[in-house]
Each structure stands twice: as C-alpha cells, then as structure tokens.
Amino acid sequence: MTNISVLIPTYNRRNTLIEAIKSVLNQTYQDFEIIIIDDGSQEPVRKIIDNINDTRIKYIYQENSGVSVARNTGLNFASGDFISFLDDDDRFLPRKLEIQVKALIENPEFGAVVSGHQVIDEGGEVVREEKPWKFNIGLDLESTLFKSFGITSLLNVLFLRTWIDNVHGFDPILKTCQDMDLWYRLLLAGCRMKWIPEVLSQYRIHKQNISHDIQITSKYLEKIYDNLFTRHVLPSSIYTRKGELYARLNVIRAMRYYEICDFLNAKKSLNKAIEQWPKYQSNEYFDLFMMFIHWQNSIWVRNKNQYLKKVMNNLPQKLKISDKARRNILATGAKSLFFDAYWHNNFDPIRKYWMQAIALDPLFLLNRGGWSIIFKSLINQYKPQQEYDR
C-alpha cells in the first residue's frame, strides 16, 4: 500500500497544475501516489499527465461538480494511510511530506499535523511567509472559531486517513469554506492536531472579485455555523458565545467591505455585529478595533498604511469614540504594522511605520524593542550595498 495519497483537484489551470505536480514529484519523501481529479476542464489535462509519464499519477475525470465533490472522488480512489491535499495552483516545498509523515508516525496520538507556508504571487514570486504558531493560535475548536480569521489552508496539513473517513470527507453542498467545515467536524470528532514550526508549502494569491467573494463566503460560512449549532453537541464555552461567533462573521464582512471602499455595506455589517454582541461597545470598542488591527496585517489588505484610517473615517453613526480613543487605536495599528513587518522580514516599510507610531504615541520612542528592530533594519539595508561595493 502507498503511504501518502496526494489529492489535486483541478479545473482549467494547465500551467500551474504542472508546477503543482512537479512540486510533489520533487519531494525528498517518495512513497506517495498523486491523484488528479479533473473537474470537467476544457483543457487537455489527460495529455499533461501522459507527458509527465510517472506511474504514481492517477487521472480521474468527472463532470464539473465543484471542489468538494472532486476531493471526495479522490478520497474514494486513494490508497494511502495518510492524505495530503494540494490545489492546482499551489506547491509543496521539497521536504513537506518527509517532515510531516515523520511527525505523525512519531506522534500517533495526533490525527493531523499542520505547518506554515510561503505566500506567492501569480508569477510564483514569494511575497511573505506565514508562521501561525508564532501567534499562539491553538488548534482546538474554540481557538479556531474565536482567535483567528480562518483555518490555515489544507495545503499545510497532513491527515491520518482514518480521521477523514470518520467524518465522511467534504460536504458536497458547500461551494466555498469546505476546509473550515472539515476542520470543525474533525475537531468535534476528537481529532487532535499538532503544529510543525516549519514553512513547507507555497500558497498562491490571485487577483479576484472581492465583492463577490464576500457575499459567497459569508453565505456558506453562516451555513457552517448554523450546522455547528444544530447538528452537534458543543461545549458550553462555545455555545454561550453563539452571538459573538455570528457577530465576528459580520465584523469580517465589514473588514472586507472597507478594503474595497464599500462603506455602506461595511457600516451595515458593523451595526449588525454590535447588535449581535453588545460587549463590543465596552472600552470604547477597543476589542472590536483590535480585530481590524489584526486584519490590516493580512495578505488581503493591499494598502496597509491607509486601511485603518479608512475604517476610522467611515464608521457608523452609532459607533462614536473619543478623539483620544481614536488616536490610541491608530497608534496601536501603526505599532502592529511595525512589528508585523519585522516578523515577516519585510524591512522596507519598517521605518515609515515606526515614525507613524511615534507621531501618534511619542512614548513609543522609549520602546527598546522598537530601537532594536530599527537597528536591524539599517543593517539589513546596508548589507546588500556592502557586498556590491566589494
């Protein structure tokens, strides 16, 4: 029996599909099979597979049915003890399977291991690295629901096959957020998950219609939450926070509407969030704005420097805060950008964010950690020039 089954659903992405397949073939761990599920592509996917000419690759064609059905089809044909999912536009780094399968074998009490990834652009250039474990994000149900803005991509996970079978794979009705639904059901079934503090894959971001994405994603995420509360017995620590969970969904809607300058829908979503979870009003909404501050650091915000100002200048009428609170929020946002740039080795904007933070909060000049980062950014800027001069 093959040890790992790598499932790649595909639909009309010929060029990136080839990259995805090659990233698996180039693994240091070679005991795998690759199952390509062609979800009704108009492109000649079968010909691509034949040209690669590797007997470990299986090709399955189905009429266009969506990625959930495609993954379930792949699971039906998979023979591996372990399951890894790879989208047709993403890539594994060479030691991904080796490191993850070793971790699962050495830690049999866990049903999945999770690592970090590089974000790459459409051309395949690395934009940044994501290392979620650095932010103490737990892999339990409560943490994934309330302490993060979504689950890490399936790309970063290696599953023990029996756990995927136990929850019957993916919900075929869901058109998006299928990974989140699977994640929640696995955790509710008792599957334990473990972080591997390594960056082992590459996740590609595309230009897209964000407005359409907000509506579709919100619809299906709300359905997933509905299913959580109606089909499962939840811990009281989660059940008593039901209003907060739906409120968070509306805050996330607002965040994304602000990004595309749809202020009308952003304000409506924020108003609804406050109605659903009135505790957001405490401490002049500081906890609410901390969610926006965390969001501004994500890959989905293009102009990070202006995002929080855009939010603060277009708040709903009922959401009133003092000038002092506003300044504090903007200062916290600038500091967050400063430290986030450092954590992601993005030294170019560091001094700009530092100056903004000082302008809003002069006491930040006394922060020793800030000075240390500034010093490191200067060294980083000098090194390339030094090498050039030699």
Image (cartoon, helix red, strand yellow):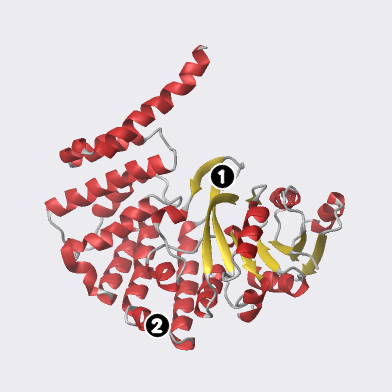
How many callouts does the rendering have?
2
Callout 2 crowding tier (Cα within 10 Å): few <14, some 14–19, many ≥20: few
Q: Is residue 76 above or below residue 267?
A: below
For this rendering, which residue is in front, 257 or 155? 155
Rendering coords of residue 36 (x, y %): 76, 62
Asked if the residue at tag 2 contacts the one at tag 1, i.e. Cβ–Cβ closer than 8 Å, the answer is: no
Q: In front here: 102 or 357?
A: 102
The dot on residue 235 is: 2
Q: Residue at point 24% right, 53% down?
A: 312
In the picture, the disc for residue 274 is: none
How far across and how far down the image is residue 331, in percent? 22, 46
Q: Is residue 254 left or right of residue 51?
A: left
The amino acid beneath tag 1 is Asp
Quick check: 110 above or below 17?
Answer: below
Please identify the quadrant where the N terminus is shown. bottom right
Of all residues shown, which one is farthest toward the top?
390
Comes first in the chain, label 1 or label 2: 1
User: Which mark's residue is nearer the viewer, 1 or 2?
Assistant: 2
The answer to whether residue 359 is seen in the rendering is yes
Counting from the top left corner in percent of width and height, residue 67 is at 65, 68
The residue under the point 44% across, 78% down is 225
Residue 103 or residue 318, whichever sits in front: 103
Relative side of 160 to 353, left or right = right
- Tag 1: Cα neighbours inside 10 Å, few (<14), some, or many (≥20)? some
Distance (Cα) linking label 1 and label 2? 40 Å
Q: Quadrant of residue 7 in the image?
A: bottom right
* Quarter-of-image position of residue 3: bottom right
SS class, disc 2:
loop
Mark 1, residue position: 121
